[in-house]
Image (tube, rainbow, N blue to C red):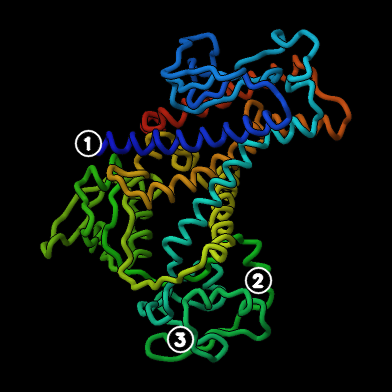
Amino acid sequence: METLIMIGNLLLGLSLLVGLHEFGHFAAAKYFKIRVDKFYIFFDFLFPLPNVLNFALLKKKIGDTEYGLGWFPLGGYVAIHGMIDETQDAESLAAEPEPNEFRAKPAWQRLIVMLGGIIMNVITGVVVFTLLTFIQGESYLPAAEARFGIVPNGLGREIGFRTGDKIVKINGRPFAEFDDVRSPDFLLGDNSFYTVERNGKLLDLNLPSRFMDKLTANGDSMFVAPRVPFVVGRVVSGQPAADAGLKAGDKLVRIGEQPIEYFDELQKALLAHAGKSTAVGIVRDGQPQTLTVKVTSAGKMGFEPKPLLHYSTRRYSLLESVPKGINNAFGIIAVQAKAISKIFKGQASAVDSLGGPVEIAQQYGGQWDWLRFWVLTGSLSMVLAFMNLLPIPALDGGHVLFLLYEMIAGRKPSDKFLENAQKVGTLMIMALMVFVLFKPLIKVFLK
């Protein structure tokens, strides 16, 4: 049953996102009076072979457009008349263009049509996160709740923080929320300093000069975080934690021979056992047990922690929720850009970082949780917008790149060039699809 629910979550989320993305192209094309031959959620052929296994689960023609639900559930498309894509090549467009064709329209109109799907995904992400903020509010940690101290990263240690320090004042004054310690007003102020309690003594730690410049260059505002005791929250199906029998509510107390109390200790211990099987000590219903877990090469087990800190909730009006929703939505794109950058720099593994349908389904989970569904769907909408904007032929970003060239150079690439670029881009996308679909096997061979 859990597997069926995961598949249902995945198909519903993908159907919504693909449908809205393609509707963005469709609506823009219709606005500029461009004929749309097909509007399909999922493919009605074996992508990327437009003449293989051509059939639809459902279809109906209304006006010039055939609307349908395809059988190949890894995408979708609109067939815009007069545009070279996976359904039309240069040879099929050899005749002079008609007024209602894509290629007959000015470059700026074609650019808007190609950006329509990305724009729709961004709007979807912003709306989802705005409504989530309005309905759920925003959680924050009161300063008094950071009672177990803090965990600094490299920049935090430059200030002088040490793991376990308790921040009691900023600029000599008590503060209300933990996020105040990372407030831009404080970080940009003159002679800013923290007061921390360490081993029963109070110490003042001055903020280094030009610290904000270092923070910006590092791209990570979380130079210090609260230390978090935890229990196991959701266990991801199909991951090592689930395979080993870990359950929600379990308290982890040991990784190998390393005692565990806080989440930062768990992260450090798992990295030390990355790629290995190790004993994991837990307490379940008051009884100690030992499980054997195969830690991934990235130092993960496959569960979400449930923090044992008491967060408060801040409520917003609908209007106040809009900037919060925008900030949360575009924060997803910032994370994606950073992750892609790390992969190209060799600082992160593509095998561990890139997820396919199986990983996405596992993230949705084996239970109907509408809050989780909308958080993940809103996140995926922003990821889809970002990925489609990449300048790869066959993606929207590739079409946008060629259109920008045409607008700047005053001439467009030949139809034959666009067809060949489409083929290259399609092969790249197919290679990526094969990679993410067969990633579990690839990981076995790479070990």
Please indicate whether residue 107 sits to the left or right of residue 62 in the image: right
Q: Quadrant of residue 101?
A: top right
**Of pointers 2 and 3, the one earlier in the residue sequence:** 3
- Tell me, for residue 322, which label it has, or none: none
Q: Name the residue that disc number 2 marks.
A: 212
Give the residue at mark 1: 1
Residue position marked by numbered label 3 in the rendering: 168
Specify the amino acid type for callout 2: Met
Q: Nearer the viewer, residue 247 or 122?
A: 122
Q: Position of residue 392 (x, y in %)?
A: 65, 31
Instruction: Kindly identify the amino acid type of the residue bearing the numbered disc 1.
Output: Met
- Residue at 84% over, 33% down: 407
Residue 158 location, x and y as percent? 56, 73
SS of the residue at dot 1? loop
> Looking at this rendering, what residue extends furthest in the left direction?
287
Marked residue nearer the N-terminal end (2 or 1): 1
Q: Position of residue 406 (x, y in %)?
A: 82, 29
Residue type at tag 3: Val
**In the rendered image, which quarter contains the C terminus?**
top left
